[in-house]
Image (cartoon, grey):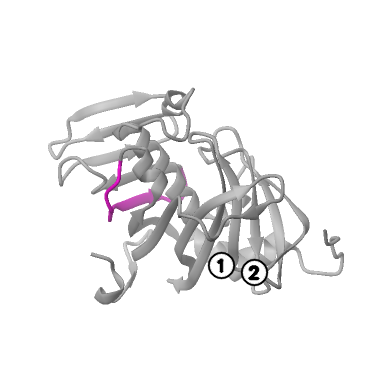
């Protein structure tokens, strides 16, 4: 295991700057993302289809609205850490659940989900992905650099992040791996609500409105004893971003849209 080097720039500061900086991030008030979504774990939970949902998040508090996640074409799947619910076109609530994380108690990897389980999982997970790494500066987050990690001849710097209890995420302590350009390459975590031990890879980083996002994500199984990823195995989840829309306080929108040929049917 490589030792920490003391004569290098602070990792978190460098990562924040490389991803667009806190000043620019503070100008973004909401994000819309449409993405292609599939994977064997999604199928194991009772959702075998390919999905192309859209999520709208508030960048200042953990609120998300999902569309096209199932149900009627105009249904909204609403996520907050404290409550999930499904809202019809007329604004009425068809089903809701308080304290949604508690509903996963006793689940194994093959326990079927209902639509509110799916709403909670996808809502918190994609919210996390869109606000990383800027959320690491929010109240209650703690970070520390770990020794470097070598993978396929590359050395990545590693940031351990401890999340506050009030923030819905995969698990309380996670590891993030950054390359020489301070771009996120991998993150390791346990999915507390699904029992998975995973390595989550990030590819195809693009700048959108001054903020950098990985446009493709792949989640695979990880061997905890060695920390090796099973990259040759099936994908637990694949997230392929089709369209990102960043919205500023004054209503200005910055759009990044893939060419039609790049979007899966």
Q: Residues within 10 Å of mark 2 (few under 14, many from 20)?
A: some
Q: For the point 43% across and 71% down, which residue is it? A: 208
The stretch drawn in magenta includes residue 49? yes
Residue 111's place in the image compared with 65, above or below, is above
Cβ atoms at labels 2 and 1 below 8 Å apart: yes
Residue 204's place in the image compared with 165, above or below, is below
Q: Tell me residue 247's x, y (percent).
A: 36, 61
Q: Tell me residue 205's x, y (percent).
A: 50, 71
Predominant SS along the magenta part: loop
Can residue 79 be seen here? no
**73 or 235, nearer to the observer:** 235
Label 2 belongs to which residue?
Answer: 182
Cα gap from disc 2 to disc 1, whole angstroms: 8 Å
In which quadrant of the rendered image does the C terminus lie? bottom left
In which quadrant of the rendered image does the N terminus lie? bottom right
Q: Give, as a single range, the part of the protein colored magenta.
A: 47-61
| Residue 241, numbered label | none
Q: Is residue 93 found left or right of 14 in the rendered image?
A: left
Where, by quadrant of the figure, is residue 10 drawn?
bottom right
Can residue 133 be seen here? yes
Mark 2 or 1: in front is 2
Residue 14's place in the image compared with 123, above or below, is below
| Residue 19, numbered label | 1
Number of disc labels: 2
Q: For the point 42% across and 39% down, which residue is it? A: 121
Q: Tell me residue 241's x, y (percent).
A: 37, 63
Q: Residues within 10 Å of mark 1 (few under 14, many from 20)?
A: many
Q: For the point 67% across and 70% down, which residue is it? A: 152
Residue 226's place in the image compared with 152, above or below, is above
């Amino acid at each position: 295991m490589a030792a920490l080097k003391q004569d290098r720039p602070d990792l978190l500061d460098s990562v924040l700057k490389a991803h667009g900086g806190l000043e620019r991030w503070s100008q973004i008030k909401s994000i819309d993302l449409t993405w292609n979504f599939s994977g064997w774990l999604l199928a194991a939970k009772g959702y075998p289809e390919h999905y192309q949902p859209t999520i709208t998040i508030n960048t200042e508090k953990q609120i998300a609205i999902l569309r096209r996640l199932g149900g009627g074409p105009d249904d909204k799947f609403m996520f907050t850490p404290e409550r999930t619910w499904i809202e019809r076109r007329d604004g009425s609530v068809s089903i809701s659940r308080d304290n949604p994380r508690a509903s996963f108690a006793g689940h194994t990897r093959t326990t079927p989900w209902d639509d509110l389980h799916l709403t909670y999982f996808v809502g918190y997970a994609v919210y996390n992905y869109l606000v990383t790494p800027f959320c690491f500066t929010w109240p209650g987050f703690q970070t520390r650099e770990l020794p470097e990690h070598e993978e396929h001849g590359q050395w990545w710097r590693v940031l351990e992040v401890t999340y506050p209890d009030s923030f819905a995420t995969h698990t309380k302590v996670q590891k993030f791996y950054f390359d020489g350009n301070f771009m996120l390459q991998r993150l390791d975590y346990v999915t507390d609500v699904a029992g998975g031990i995973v390595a989550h890879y990030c590819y195809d980083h693009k700048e959108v409105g001054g903020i950098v996002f990985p446009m493709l994500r792949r989640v695979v199984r990880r061997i905890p004893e060695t920390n090796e990823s099973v990259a040759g195995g099936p994908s637990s989840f694949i997230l392929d971003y089709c369209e990102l829309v960043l919205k500023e306080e004054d209503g200005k929108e910055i759009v990044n849209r893939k060419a039609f040929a790049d979007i899966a049917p």
